[in-house]
Image (spheres, helix red, strand yellow):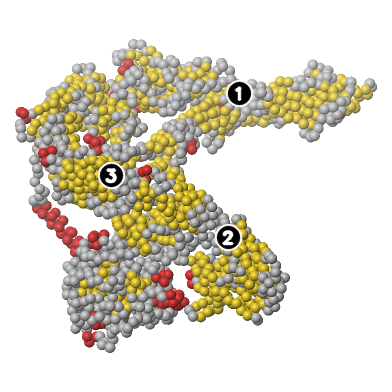
Amino acid sequence: RLLVTFLQRVHSNVHACTEDAGTSLYFVNTSLLQITFSSTVGVFIPCPAAGSPSATLRWYLGTGDDIYDVPHIRHVHANGTLQLYPFSPSAFNSFIHDNDYFCTAENSAGKIRSPNIRVKAVFREPYTVRVEDQSAMRGSAAVFKCLTPPAVQEYVSVVSWEKDTVSLTSEGRFVTSPTGALYILDVQKEDALSTYRCITRHRYSGETRQSNGARLLVSDPAESVPVLLDGFQSHEVLVGDVVELPCIASGYPNLASRWIKDGRPVPSDSRWSKRNTGLSMTDLRLEDSGTYICEITNSFGSAEVTGTLTVIEPLRVTLTPKKLKTGIGSTVILSCALSGSPGYTVRWYRNTELIEPDEFISIRGADNETLVINSAQKSHSGAYQCFGTRKKQTAQDFAIVVLEDGTPRILSSFSEKVMNPGEPFSLMCSAKGAPPPTFSWTLDDEPIQRDSGHRYNQYTASDGSTISYMNVSGPQILDGGVYRCSARNSVGSAEYQARINVRGPPSIRPMKNLTAVAGRDSFIHCRVIGYPYYFISWYKDSLLLPDNHRQVVFENGTLMLSDVQKGMDEGEYLCSVLIQPQLSISQSVHITVKVPPLIQPFEFPPASIGQLLYIPCVVSSGDMPIRITWRKDGQVIVSGSGITIETKEFMSSLQISSVSLKHNGNYTCIASNDAATVSRERQLIVRVPPRFVVQPNNQDGIYGKAGVLNCSVDGYPPPKVVWKHAKGSGNPQQYHPVPLTGRIQILPNSSLLIRHVLEEDIGYYLCQASNGVGTDISKSMFLTVKIPAMITSHPNTTIAIKGQTKGLNCTARGERPIIIRWEKGDTVIDPDRNLRYLIATKDSGDEVISTLTLKPAERGDSVFFSCHAINSYGEDRGLIQLTVQEPPDPPELEIREVKARSMNLRWTQRFDGNSIITAFDIEYKNKSDTWEFKQSTRNISPIINQANIVDLHPASVYSIRMYSFNKIGRSEPSKELTISTEEAAPDGPPMDVTLQPLTSQSIQVTWKAPRKELQNGVIRGYQIGYRENGPGSNGQYSIVEMKATGDGEVYTLDNMKKFAQYGVVVQAFNRAGTGPSSTEINATTLEDVPSQPPENVRALSITSDVAVISWSEPSRTSLNGVLKGYRVIYWSLYPDGEWGEMQNITTPRERVELRSLEKFTNYSVQVLAYTQAGDGVRSSVLYLQTKEDIPGPPAGIKAVPSSSSSVVVSWLPPTKPNGIIRKYTIFCSSPGSGQPAPSEYETSPEFLHYRIMHLLRGQQYMLWVAAVTSAGRGNVSEKVMIEPAGKAPAKIISFGGTVSTPWMKDVRLPCSSVGEPAPAIKWTKDSEDSAIPLALDGHRLIHSNGTLTLRSVKAEDSGYYTCTATNTWGFDTIIVNLLVQVPPDQPRLTVSKTSASSITLSWIPGDNGGSSIRGFVLQYSVDNSEEWRDVFISSSERSFRLENLRCGTWYKVKLAAKNSVGAGRISEIIEAKTHGREPSFNKDQHLFTHVNATHARLNLHGWNSGGCPITSVILEYRPQNSWAWQSLRANVTSDVFLTDLREATWYELKMRACNSAGCGNETSQFATLDYDGSTIPPIKSAQGEGDDVKKLFSIACPVILATLGVALLFIIRKKRKEKRLKRLRDAKSLAEMLISKNNRSFDTPVKGPPAGPRLHIDIPRVQLLIEDKEGVKQLGDDKATLPVTDAEFSQTVNPQSFCTGVSLHHPALIQNTGPLIDMSDIRPGTNPVSRKSVKSAHSTRNRYSSQWTLTKCQSSTPARTLTSDWRTVGSQHGITVTESDSYSASLSQDTDKGRNSMVSTESASSTYEELARAYEHAKLEEQLQHAKFEITECFISDSSSDQMTTGTNENGDSMTSMSTPSEPGICRFTASPPKPQDSDPTKNVAVPIPHRAKSEYCNLPLYMKSDPHFRKPDPHDSCPVVPPREASMRNLTRSYHSRHLTLEPGAKPPPGLAHPTPSSVNLPQRTLMMAGASASAPSAPAATAPSAPADPTASAGPVENRLPTQHSKMGGSRDSLLEMSSSGAARAQKQGAGAYSKSYTLV
């Protein structure tokens, strides 16, 4: 069997490289680069090269050594196939079995070689395969990898994976990767119950291995960053291949993967496929190369794997030319073109020999791709190969170069011809040579110069010949003569000549004298030109030539002298040309003859070593001087070293004084003169008889190794050495020549090499040498072959039975002594140490037998044993695989599931005893019985690994065990498991189920529990299933669950469809499951308003005042009830943008006719359907326009005289134009003139005045005007009388009246006038009781025609403007009332109702800004979210319900109104929470329903949902004292099993249940049972000295660390307190500055004198707090008054059981554009911060309240709190007008209840700097300067969220009870009265007393950023001051706004006050639920604070006069109190509007 691995694609292309089919070389397989085979099989390797005719094929090692046959090991067949035989591991030879080979093919064309072929043998060796256990989270991925030893990893591949002995296919969740890994996707809990194994196969030996079984630990998902399970590294692949880049990870929550290539996302490509396991790429291209990144992310982090993919092209080599035939001496250029990826190397070979550059050959190019041979010689012929190598790629190509004699030869030529002058002619010569020759042309031996008349060129024809043309254009006589073409190359030359005659007078060109060489031929040309002539004659010494046989005269006039002789041929020659009879011309030339040297022959005589030698070289003839030199072997001989050269005039001698071998060689004598150089060469041979340099000696050879028989001789000629062999060890009888094969060779030094010594090589060897000189010599030696130790026989595999004796035999042979050593695995067996082993050895003569006996065999003996045979010449090893069989191990039994009457078992067979499992037995019994009463299931199939045991009794305890069987026997019983069966589900349904509809979306369900006998356990809860029974429903039940509370149950189903019939069933469940359901009963939800508008609403205008509206009924599903009818709402839209009054019509039909509409007017129409429940959703606004009609009369008319004959009439457009005005008609009649009809004048609609000319002076005229539309002329205006006058007083023809315009627009107020002279125009504006002339600036401009233009009008531009026109004869005036429309004021938004999924909002619109409100925009978002959603609401709505909200979630809501000008300011942000809370666990419920040794079952029904469905339950558990938690995600509706627990172990358990409202936590401990089902004792600490030390250390370390931490914290906080105290004092200067501007009282008139000082505190928001011991006092009907004077705090006051106080709060800022800053918070204590900072703060909530209270208390009783909100202080009567929309009062000690009842109370929050301002502000009030301020309670948290408290709160004050350490910044402080001696009795000062004791804890949350002028802290102050945070001055300044708390005189005191005073406090009735406790007053002296000077820039007017009405309702306005203008305040006072004040309650 042949197993061969080809690393590259196999190409069977045959490369033929020859022109003729007779001779060629080629490759039959160019891609055979590696062969791997099994040692047990062997391999045949055919030679990749071949040739035609048949080539000689030979194999070589990669080093170039030729190979030889080794019997039974290696053999080369006659056809060139190399065979390697199977062999044992002991016969492994790396030179043979792991080496590079190549094959050559040689014939007459040359010799080529294949690329190196790596041949590697793989033999059987032991190895194991492992798979490691893995862990994964449910829903994630897991990866198992098959681990093989590195030594065999290259040959072993994974063929399959098994799951519980069942083969897995790569599909679904189980995927096998190309690398053999097993991917498990979407891991499930049941995957942990299986065992996973991989099956591998050895590619060459065919052996298969099965790995161990691995398990998967599955945990519940836990939030974690992604972790890579399998990735990829750098790959290098070929173009067109397929590759997969693995990338699989684990993590939670969901993972997202992204592939990036070279920094960019991977482009979409059909060749690429992104999978869960990685990126698969097919048909790869070069552009796919790059760096790939697989990035896996989730919300907790990311992981990535990076690798480089390199796509390369296959390496291809092309050598050109393929065959080159050229001449010797030419230049040969071979070009090797390589294609493919770069990075290759190039090598050149000629006839398989590596080419090295020399004087002829050079290798050029950047990559050595060009081979150049200069002056190529015959030896350069052959086959040239170019090898390209890149890593493991090798490619080659070859070319055949043939070099031959390339002397040029003329193939064709031109002939002699006659030409006329001017007639062009062309001459051609063709020659062939190698290399191609180059042509040159001569004329009469003179080179022809190229010019315009003579051109010649050459080219190479397709047959290889070179052709040259000589072209002569316009020839003249001088162009005639002998033309010669000469072809020359590096080898030689050839030439041809012929005469070309040009007609003309003949003449002879001058001829040069010539030199001829004696003995050679010479030619003399007669250079005749012109034609015709008769003939040419040559004369010498007046003799006509020729006169001898050596002279020849050619017809063309050339004289040839053959074998020139000096004496005869030298002399003067005359050329005579007969041109006419008796007329000739002649020219002479002189010939000089030179004689070359002639060397007489000489010979070297035979010479022996040491002889004298004399050789003469004599030149017998030749012209002198003659130069003679000697050369030896081509090198010049220099006298010396025993050689002497003597040279005379014509003779030179060579003398050698003592001849030696070094004088052998070729000697040349060279003679030269001016004529020539000649030489004569002879060889000197020095003969030496042979002799031994190294004589052979007897030696040993080792079998299988190489051996060299040394024998070295010398002599001359070199002796021939022959080796002979005589077999046998006795005396040699007869020698035979040694056959020289590849195994046996004679080395260059004559030694005999035996590459592989065999036993047959033993014997005598004779080394015999001869060279023909003297006698032969010889020497014999004896070769002894030593046999190394070899294992000849051993079993490969054998089987033993555990407990029995087993013997292993091993036979060896070789030279004695032989030692046989046994090894078990890698350990040497020593019988002396391990008595279980016995080794016996027996020598039988030829062999040694060793026996290893195992007494007895054990399981651990199932390994590889090896016997090692060792002697002095080598060693060998034999492997024996021993398999010890035994009964199997018992299976590992586990309980998968236990039910009431059955259980499911699963088992894993760990060890099969090395024998196939044949069956299983299961036995079980009641735990109390013995195994004699067992029940069993026998002979279970071995392919099954799970079983169900049925017919069990519920709630019973069973014991279970198992047995395994194989052919050896039965296993021991498995570990006994104890289980308890579960309860059974109820068998009866709930009883007496009734339904009661409550709302349109809820139904109340009531029922009773099932009968007791059918409950089958404790009823834990119920499942209510409901479904819609109407058409289109899917019939599926929706299920909700609730916990059982008793026999009678009630549940309300919410979020149901409106007015829909539902069927309801109820089921009871216990721990076991759910019982049968009750009979379905039906009920219908109540009606609701339609949720969709009518469809297909259309509007059609019929006439100018009638329109028809039609529609179709909404879909039935959206009616939500019985349709009662439709309502059509419509309103007009005026051209100025204003809306008309909304009207509506109700009709039962689907069509209505609208009558009495305004003519030619735009209307907006909406239609809605209504039911008994109310109006439904309106349709989209539909627009229509009524038709045109005749217009109404002009709204006004004026007529004024403009001269004595003309008048000017002006008018206003009609109030109701009823269409587009086309023109105006002016009528003029003179009542007294008698004219029957008035005159009519017309003007375009753009002009509203007209001048009537040519009237009579003194005549009365009546004028009137009518407008005209397309419908006709309208009604006429009033008629006016006018008379032309000579005098024209000033008159204004423009009209006054009211003008409305949106703000920020330009408005024009016309004031056109007439009169003579031209009137002067003046504009004034009314201001209070005076008129102020208008100042002209960039804002106001009066045009020449009197028009006043106001640019970008603002609200303050509103008012009355007067235009006065004056001239000499009079004046006229008009008044224009300008109304500027602005965006509407912010609405007041409140929460009226909440539910689990909805929030109902109501609001009161603010001022509409002078333009009707178009609608409202409601924005809401989840708290701490920036994603706001918009809802658009009709202008008529005053409430709205947000639905489909998340349960138990806080929402932020804000509202803005829109009018024609734009959107108004946004209301304050309020927050409200939907019903519901986070889950909690019922402590009465049992957490565990069942626990055994390895499993625990949890009851999750104990979780109370809190009103919101539970979305997830996460369990974490771990063994006690362990670090690692295991996670599990569960469903609250199902039971959860904890599996794979340790027996008899205590566990910790943490549970976390989450819903939309939050998460609840529960912890517990439990213990698993012991293996026998018994419980284990509680955890006890181990006793021992070491444990005591550990315990002491574990206790002491935390104590010491905690002490150090507390000390460090105390120091840090002390420093911070000091800094905060310093900053607190800094607040004083700023507060003084601010308070000086606004601490004045109101100037509004009041009735009666004030009885005490009024307390005015200018804080942005103020809350009045009334604490009443008896209860809440109702202080008036619509107002509440309370006197606050010093009499209140007098010691003699009549005791009253109530406390009075003022509570102050500071607001947040609101911006006019968008939710940039979180505003007031309906949930108390939310810090308003910029949303930019919220994003980085996660979900941490900062809740705090700033409140200080001025109180007067008589006894310690619970306090109630009444909170004021939205009040207006009357400016004239001193009364309070309340604007609150809801009032409530209640008591509450519970924080959550207090929160939830705050839905209609506005709230705000404060920053730390605002707290500081409030505190300092109170202290700077004049009335409180003598008060003692004390901080009574405070929670503070700065940026590090530290808690700072100095006491405890035992009285449960409401402020404190709602302030947890996680809600920082809640503070309260009080002011106490001064001592009598400290107060000024002349002052009427209100000084409050404290309401809390000094002994209670307090911290001060105050800080400011101000100047460094601070007051020192009071050393007697009982409350430490905390250093404040820094706050920007900008925010500090902006926090002061126009909000006032005023104590106004003039109101009645409330009941219970002993001394009523005129002072009053305004108290609208909004309530805050808060409980507090009173305290005694401190005795510390009061602190006073100096006043700061007032800001000179502040307005001097009263405070309330600086508060415009339109800004008073806007909390957080940017319009500061310090920035109001006096004019605005005056106008506000004039209009009688008081200042608005608003308070906020913070809890």
Query: Residue tagged by mark 1?
Result: 325
Image position of 1842 with respect to 41: above or below: below
Query: Residue tagged by mark 2?
Result: 1191
Instruction: Identify the element where label 1 is drawn.
Output: strand
**Mark 1 surroundings: few (<14), some (14-19) or many (≥20) residues within 10 A:** some
* Residue 453 found in image quarter: top right
Q: Which mark is residue 828?
A: none
Dot in front, 3 or 2: 2
From where the camera sits, is residue 1050 visible? yes
Query: Residue tagged by mark 3?
Result: 1084
* Residue 334 found in image quarter: top right
**Mark 2 surroundings: few (<14), some (14-19) or many (≥20) residues within 10 A:** many
Q: Nearer the viewer, residue 691 or 417?
A: 417
Q: Residue at x 35, y 74 (%)?
A: 1769
Q: Residue furthest bottom?
A: 1882
From where the camera sits, is residue 607 visible? no
Label 1 sits on what residue type?
Lys
Is 564 positioned to the left or the right of 345 in the image? right
Question: Which one is earlier in the sequence, the residue at label 3 or at label 2?
Answer: 3
Q: Quadrant of the C terminus?
A: bottom left
- Return the x and y of residue 1240 as percentages of the image width and height: 67, 64
